[in-house]
Every structure is written in C-alpha cells, then in structure tokens.
Amino acid sequence: MSTQATTGSCFSNSQGRSYLVTATDDEWTRLVTETGSAQLGFGQTNLMVNSVQITYAAGLCAWRIRNSVSQVTKRVGFGFLVGACGPAPYSGSIPNIVIQQDDVLEVFTQAVS
C-alpha cells in the first residue's frame, strides 16, 4: 500500500487547529494534532467548528468527522490537492458542528493510477 502526506485544519470563528497524518491509500486514516498527537475530539472538545480544510499530495482525498463510539458520520467533504487552487479562507465552510470528545477527523486517500 502507498501512503501520502495529508494535512488539515479545523476552524471556528475565533480559533483553529492544525492536524496531520501520513495517510495509507484506500483506507480511512485518522488525523492527529501537529503538537501533541491528539485526535479531533481531544484537540477541540466543545468548540463549534464551521470550516474544515484538508490538503493532500496526489490522487484524491475525502474526509469525514465521525463519532468513534456511535460510528455516526457527522460531516463529509473533499480535500484540496497541494498546489491547486484553494484552500481559500471560506472554501472549507461546513454547517456548524460542536465537536464532542469522541469525534475523530479521518481521510480516505487514493493514489494516482
């Protein structure tokens, strides 16, 4: 299996946090904070997030915010190819979501074939 560098940011109106992972292609991989290696639910507990921006190296990338206990997927989207247009400040806008402790940010990447 191949891997690729994937980075992301989750923003509220007042603050944001950066996440990263070396994603394994063709499977869901969890992103963790750049500092401390915390998952989304620990990094931004009880924060209302309204923007998610993910960048990836090549191929394609989908992301999701999912509750790791109930398995409920709360938000989904697609990443931006590094060097392509975006991400612009409002390009990753999502409906408001309050992050719970069990929430995780995951990416699904596929390599260029």
Image: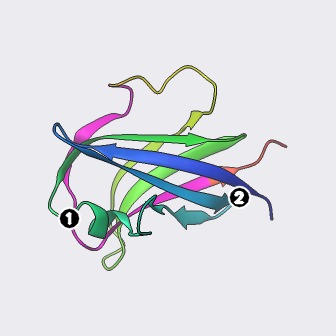
Residue at 28% across / 70% down in the picture?
A: 42
Element type at mark 2: loop
Residue 111 image position (x, y, % from top left) = 76, 48
Tag 1: amino acid:
Thr
Q: Which residues are magenta?
A: 90-108
Residue in front for this viewpoint, 85 or 59? 85
Q: Sort mark 1 into few (<14), some (14-19) or many (20+) by Cα contacts within 10 Å.
A: some
What kind of residue is marked 2?
A: Asp
Residue reaching furthest to the right: 113
Residue closer to the observer: 81 or 34: 34
Are there few (<14), some (14-19), or many (20+) residues within 10 Å of tag 2? some
User: Outermost residue toward the front?
Assistant: 35
Q: Residue under circle 2?
A: 25
Labels 2 and 1: the sequence-earlier one: 2
Give the residue number, with chain letter if any, for mark 1.
Answer: 45
* Quadrant of res 56: top right
Q: Which mark is residue 88?
A: none
Left or right, residue 93 beside residue 110: left
- As measured in the structure, the alpha-carbon distance from the residue carrying label 2 to the one carrying label 1 is 28 Å
| Residue 14, percent from left and from top | 16, 39
At a point 72% along the width and 40% down the height, the residue shown is: 58
Q: Position of residue 33 (x, y in %)?
A: 42, 60
In the rendering, at what x and y percent does residue 81 appear? Answer: 62, 33
Count of picture labels:
2
Quadrant the N terminus occupies: bottom right
